[in-house]
Image (cartoon, rainbow, N blue to C red):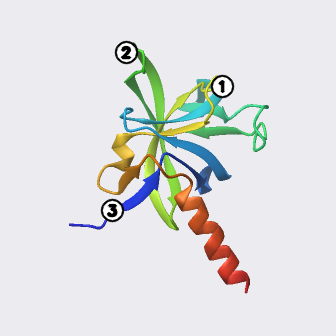
């Protein structure tokens, strides 16, 4: 049996492929899938292939840069929201860095502009890797800062 890492109810993570560092996220054991806040999500035809384009975050977020991402590697899935209704969303595969470890993660693209956290991490990603302690916060980020401080000495 592999050792599971304790994660708190919120944290900050890096998404190297998306050029996002120390981005706020909420751990949600009630959600199955993970989601990231996006705008301008659409498919386009480029060179005879269907490409998904999107912009991460929005101009109210400090890391928003207006950069458009494009990928041929995506799928459409029916995702059930917290109010019980289902909607079709695009899902992309990327990497997340927590506790100094890089993991693959699937993120559904969603307008989370009304939500406090731009990223929600669901059970599918947490399973087998993490135990959630709802009384704690930012455990990965605190470890990252402590490691950086130690290396600076």
Counting from the top left corner in percent of width and height, residue 113 is at: 66, 25
Q: Is residue 112 left or right of residue 63?
A: left
Q: Is residue 88 above or below residue 127?
A: above
Q: Dot 2, crowdedness within 10 Å: few (<14), some or many (≥20)?
A: few
Helix, strand or loop status at disc 3: loop
In three-dimensional space, the C-alpha distance between marks 1 and 2, rounded to whole angstroms, equals 19 Å
Tell me the quadrant of the picture where the C terminus can be found. Answer: bottom right
Q: Dot 3, crowdedness within 10 Å: few (<14), some or many (≥20)?
A: few
Can I make out residue 48 in this image? no
Helix, strand or loop status at disc 1: loop
Helix, strand or loop status at disc 2: loop
Q: Residue at x 67, y 82 (%)?
A: 151
Looking at the image, the residue that sits furthest to the left is: 1
Quadrant assignment, res 144: bottom right
Q: Residue at x 39, y 50 (%)?
A: 132
* Residue behind mark 1: 113
Q: Dot 1, crowdedness within 10 Å: few (<14), some or many (≥20)?
A: some
Counting from the top left corner in percent of width and height, residue 139 is at: 53, 59
Say which mark, if any, is on residue 4.
Answer: 3
Q: Is residue 118 above or below residue 132?
A: above
Q: Is residue 153 left or right of residue 104?
A: right
Say which mark, if any, is on residue 84.
Answer: 2
């Amino acid at each position: 049996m592999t050792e599971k890492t304790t994660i708190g109810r919120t944290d900050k993570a890096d998404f190297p492929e998306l050029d996002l560092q120390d981005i706020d996220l909420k751990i949600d054991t009630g959600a199955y899938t993970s989601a990231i806040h996006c705008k301008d999500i659409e498919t386009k035809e480029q060179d005879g292939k269907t490409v998904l384009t999107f912009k991460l975050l929005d101009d109210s977020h400090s890391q928003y840069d207006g950069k458009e991402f494009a990928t041929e590697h995506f799928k459409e899935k029916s995702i059930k929201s917290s109010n019980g209704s289902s909607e079709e969303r695009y899902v992309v595969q990327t990497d997340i860095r927590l506790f100094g470890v890089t993991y693959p993660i699937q993120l559904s693209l969603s307008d989370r502009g009304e939500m406090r956290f731009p990223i929600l991490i669901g059970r599918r990603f947490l399973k087998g890797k993490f135990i959630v302690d709802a009384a704690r916060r930012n455990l990965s980020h605190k470890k990252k800062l402590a490691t950086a401080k130690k290396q600076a000495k």
